[in-house]
Amino acid sequence: MIIIFWVCTVICAVLDRLTKVLAEEHIHGMTPVIRIGGKDIFWFSITHNTGAAFSSFSGRTTALSVFTVIMLLAIIVYFHKQKDKNVFTSVVFGMITGGGLGNLFDRIAYGKVTDFLNLFPFTFIFNVADVFVVIGAILLIIYMMFFEKKDGYTPEGDIPDVMYGPPSDDEEDIDG
């Protein structure tokens, strides 16, 4: 599963880099992609962000880069220490890591992140790395809430007698 994580990480980072290069070369002004009833639903336009999400922490590239490196190292260590790795978690952690690396590369190499995707009704502009991080994080939260095996978890009705001991005389024996 570790190889799936790293392959997905590299694919996501490369796709982010490729889309940013293409956006810089080919997008000039606002380019509608999907329009419904005269309303732009999805369009391209280039902007550069020296901050984080929603332009928060603008101009703090070094601090954001250090924070991103720490978070990426924490994610990588956490993933590698997981006992129950599977294809799903490998891909999801790879998406988050690859997206983080994509934006980290921009911050270190250019001092800013290239954003070019616009989606109605949102007023913010984002990029492919952001898509990977957000979708990966949402899927990871859903997985952890509903599908991850918890330590010591025993499905209802499958509780061994050693946990509670044999039924007392005043308790009704359900099985017998």
Image (cartoon, rainbow, N blue to C red):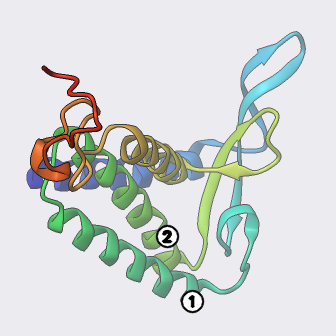
Name the residue carrying label 2.
106
Q: Position of residue 105 (x, y in %)?
A: 42, 71
Q: Position of residue 61 (x, y in %)?
A: 60, 84
- Compared with residue 88, is residue 153 higher up or lower down, i.e. above or below? below
Q: Where is residue 70 in the image (x, y as percent from the top left)?
A: 39, 82
Q: How crowded is mark 2: few (under 14 residues within 10 Å), some or many (20 or more)?
A: some
Badge 2 element: helix
- Compared with residue 23, is residue 43 higher up or lower down, i.e. above or below? above
Looking at the image, the residue that sits furthest to the front is 169
Name the residue carrying label 1.
63
Q: Is residue 63 left or right of residue 76?
A: right
- Amino acid type indicated by mark 2: Asp
Q: Which of 168 and 129 is in front in this view?
A: 168
- Amino acid type indicated by mark 1: Ala
- Compared with residue 67, is residue 11 higher up or lower down, i.e. above or below? above
Badge 1 element: helix
